[in-house]
Every structure is written in structure tokens, then in C-alpha cells.
Amino acid sequence: MGDTKELAVGYTRANATQSNAGLFLLQRLDITPGMHVLDVGCGPGNLTAHIASLVGPSGTVTGIDPSAERIALANQLLPSNPKLSFHVGIAEDLSRFPSASFDAVFVNSTLHWVRDQPAALREFARVLKTGGGGRLGISGGSGDYRTAQERIKADVLGREPYRAYEEEAPPKFLGRAELEGMLKDAGFGAWEIVVNRIVKETRDADEMIDWLDTSSSGKTYGGIPLELRPKAREEMKREWEKMATEDGIRMEMELLVTVAVRK
Ligand SMILES: C[S@@+](CC[C@H](N)C(=O)[O-])C[C@H]1O[C@@H](n2cnc3c(N)ncnc32)[C@H](O)[C@@H]1O
């Protein structure tokens, strides 16, 4: 169940929540002119382009993402940003980049999709400058907090006929303790993790589901076949409608925001 052009384009129109979370992380990561930054899971590249404005003419920003559809959109930003470059690739394999080649690695709203998270963290450590010169910034949903989305997805996809289709690579949200263990094993010497409490507000259930669809590249529906998606969507919609008030729907979330220093 891969990404589609429609979902990729949809994400460019509805990513304000991730974008704001990314700006919060960037403030803590303290990107300065001249830095070389890697944006892992860059999607269509809007935050990558923003980082390019922070590093200025003497810095560079490189984005990677496994979705060819999202990288195609990101490549449209290149003519106006000579400091940018984009590649199709995954967090677990950064072998195209030499060791100790980046000052900062930025990972926003992405780590939960990465299948082999310990391997990805080891790759982040490898490509960062050593001796305190390289910093890793990660922001993403906390495994210590369960959102309404996770509850509704598990509820609906646990019903017939969906329960027969197991999700191949479900999102994995790390809790603080697990994340700290991985940072230590990967070679980070010090880190600070704060909780960023945010609320996703939508007019109605359709807008909430549209946002979840584009944000997850369609994985809101787990492993069910494409033809069952409309029916599952209707059932999810009924669950979201139970949370609606006259002001719309609010989903509370907790993000773990990490800045870690490479030993
Ligand atoms: C919610 S989007 C976040 C995009 C962007 N970082 C932002 O904040 O707007 C999650 C991104 O993670 C990417 N992704 C999924 N698996 C990945 C992996 N193994 N390595 C790197 N990126 C991955 C998806 O293709 C998608 O573009």
C-alpha cells in the first residue's frame, strides 16, 4: 500500500501541524549559517527549504525520503534554492553520505515509520560530526501517549472483515525510555527530551481523516486491500463523529522532541 501522487500533493496542502512541530524542533536544534544539514523523511521538502534559509549561502541542506512521489514534489523547489538537494532513500541506509559529513540531522514526524529504528539511529550517528560537533533533532509522536487516532484505527481495523489483513509495517512510536536506550547504543553522549503537547483541530471527521491519510501515505488503513478502504473510512468517520462538538474535532497529541549530541 504505497504512496500516491494524490496523497503526496494532499500533504503539501495540509501539513501545518507537522510544519509547526518541525519549527519547534528547529528552534531547539539551533541551526546556524554555514551548517550542513540532513533532513531525513523530508516529504515534499517545505521544511527542508526553510532550513536552507537558516544555513544561508555557505551551508547546504540535503533531503531524503523513500517516496518517489514526495521527492518529485521536493525537486520542484530546487531552482529557487541552490543550496538544496533531494534523494530517494531511507533512514536505515545513508551509505550515499560519508561518515562525519553533517552538522545536524533533522527528523520530523518520520521516525515512527522507520522499520529498523536502531539501525537508523546508528546511521544518524555515523553521518554526524563527532566530538560534540554533530547534533540530532527528532520530533514525533510519543509511545508513552495514546492518541484518539491510534484508538480508532485499532478499533475499526480489529473488526470484520478488516481483521484478516495484518499491517505489514505498522507505525512504531517510541517512548522516552526506549528512545534513550537507542540513543545511547547508537553513540550519542548527551541529550535533552521535552514533551510538546499539541492539538490537531479539524472542522469535521472528513477533514481529520483526509489529514491522517495524506500524513501516513495511506497507512491509516493498515494492511487492508484498496477496495475495502471506503468502507473502513466510513466506520472510522462514525467514530470521529462521536468526538465532534459545535467547534469541530480536537485530537490531543504528545510529541517527544529530542536534541542529542554525537560523542
Ligand atoms: C508525516 S511525513 C513528514 C514529512 C516531513 N518531515 C514533514 O515534517 O513535513 C513522514 C515521511 O516519512 C517518510 N518515511 C517513511 N519511511 C521512512 C524511512 N524508512 N526513512 C525515511 N523516511 C521515511 C514518508 O515517506 C513521509 O514523507
Image (tube, rainbow, N blue to C red):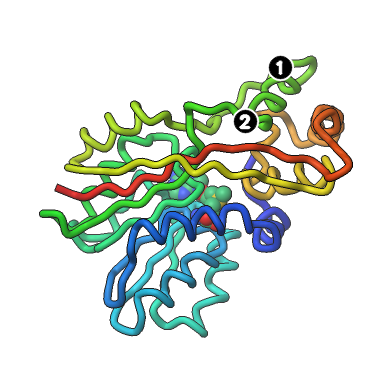
Q: Amino acid at mark 2?
A: Thr
Q: Which of 192 and 76 lies nearest the eye of the viewer?
A: 192
Residue receiving disc 1:
158
Eye-nearest disc, 2 or 1: 2
Q: Amino acid at mark 1?
A: Gly
The residues tagged by marks 2 and 1 sit, at their Cα atoms, a distance apart of: 17 Å
| Mark closest to the chain's N terminus, 2 or 1 | 2
Q: Is residue 80 above or below residue 28?
A: below
* Rendered image quadrant of residue 194: top left
Numbered badge on residue 147? 2
Q: Is residue 15 above or below residue 109?
A: below
Name the residue: 34% across, 58% down: 29
Name the residue: 67% across, 24% down: 151
Q: Position of residue 37 (x, y in %)?
A: 33, 65
Q: Position of residue 33 (x, y in %)?
A: 30, 77
Q: Is residue 2 above or below residue 42?
A: above
Q: Which of 93 and 37 lies nearest the eye of the viewer?
A: 37
* Rendered image quadrant of residue 157: top right
- Furthest toward the left, the residue is 131
Q: Position of residue 189 (x, y in %)?
A: 17, 42
Instruction: Look at the image and tell me whether residue 67 can be seen.
Output: no
Q: Position of residue 190 (x, y in %)?
A: 20, 43
**Mark 1 Cα-neighbour bin, 10 Å: few <14, some 14–19, many ≥20:** some
